[in-house]
Image (cartoon, rainbow, N blue to C red):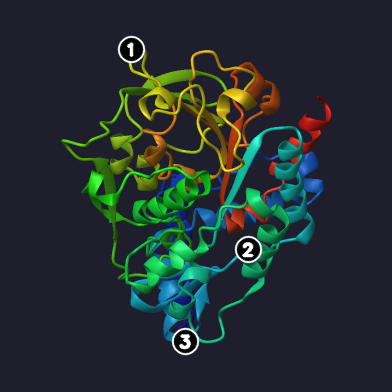
Amino acid sequence: MAFAFLAVIALFSITGLVLPDRAFSPQENRYLTTRPSLSLSALLSAEYMAAIEEYATDQFPFRDIWVSYKALAQRLSGQKENNDVFFAADGYLIGKPQQAPADVAQGNLDAVLSMQAAGYQPALLVSPMAAEILKDKLPAWAYSPEHADLVRRLQAEAAEAFVNVTPYLHQAAATGRQIFFRTDHHWTMAGAYLGYQAYMDWLGETLMPLEAFAERTVSKEFFGTLWSKNSYPGTEADDIVVYEFGEGNMTPMPAYEVEYFDGNQIWLADSVFQSEYLEQKDKYAYFLGQNRPLVVIRQLEGHPSTAEANGNGAGASTGTGASTAEAGAGAAEAKRKLMIFKDSYAHSFAPFLLPHFDEIHLADLRYWRQDPITYMENHDISEVLFLYNADSFLSDRSISQLRAYMARR
């Protein structure tokens, strides 16, 4: 037994030395720790030994297999979750809501209200997570009302600026419609359509009916972020179903281009759908690619503006009753523009807005280092949508930085 034990240790030690280091784990969807550099200062401060321990853990031979076995052991032992992901009913993996410091939520809400006080027309759409909408699928005693209580408080304080998507999601979930992925924390495009419906109702405008879209399955092999954290073996892959404008629509899809900015360079694409990501692990990036500081979707020249096409004259209606032209300091060409401060929930949502806006600017404040208020002024943008999932809005401190930019005006 002793010799067998030593043989196993020797086998894994030799294997770990022979196998090349991996920089990235597709299964866990994260970068792995590589061999740290040895220095006298790091060795004396114990930083080197801590880094070596993390390196050995990340580069352990056949790590992906052991991660899956660990999830299986957790499930067989009766555990309700693994790595903050619940084993839920009907094959769902549902993420445990993140801790939500009250000061973060209040600071982010104050940023929204400061834009409203400055004359912009902000809308706040905070989507509940699957743990709230699909709470009947959670294990017994796993549900916590903390996020729901905070979102209700946001709704009360934001008042007319709040876009309440929760009833739309609850109603669709009650019919059995899949509005969240089973292996990923994002809503499906069917769920994003409900967000679009809630926003159009808030604006008081007519939305494109579901009948205007054709459904197309672009992948049947999607394992999302929750599976990457949990890695439970035998989990069934998700389908990615896309809503595309069908042929013969009364309102045809306008010709458009997409401009991406990654912080260093700009490049153009001709579609909001990026098919190259269907060959990668992060297949949700099919919608507008990965998180970038700034993405701009604009109609090409030669097409009538959205305001003109919809018969809205010089401006488009908003939830506060003011026109874009009035609030946008006289947008001469009646171009309707929208700024979306967002997380990745906006990626599958934005395509639905194409018939309604001439330009859609999507900014991720976690990565964007430009002054967003100056940017909006330079581009004559007055309509603003804050679109986040509850986990992000209640924990992301970058949103509150808008108050500092507003204070400089």
- Counting residues from the N terminus, which is met first, the one under dot 1 or under dot 2? 2
Q: Residues within 10 Å of mark 2 (few under 14, many from 20)?
A: some
Residue 222 drawn at (x, y percent): 31, 54
Question: Which of marks 1 and 3 precedes in the sequence?
Answer: 3
Q: Where does label 3 land, which residue?
A: 77
Q: Secondary structure at mark 1?
A: loop
Determine the residue positioned at 48% across, 61% down: 229
| Mark number displayed over residue 83 | none
Residue type at mark 2 is Gln
Amino acid type at circle 3 is Ser
Residue picked out by circle 1: 302
Image point (34%, 76%), residue name: 90
Q: Residues within 10 Å of mark 1 (few under 14, many from 20)?
A: few
Query: Which label is found at residue 98?
Result: 2
At horizontal 32% and vertical 24% (from top left) the residue drawn is 270
Instruction: Answer above or below: position of 69 versus 360.
Output: below
Q: Give the mark count.
A: 3
Give the mark nearest the N terminus, 2 or 3.
3
> Could you tell me which quadrant the N terminus lies in?
bottom left
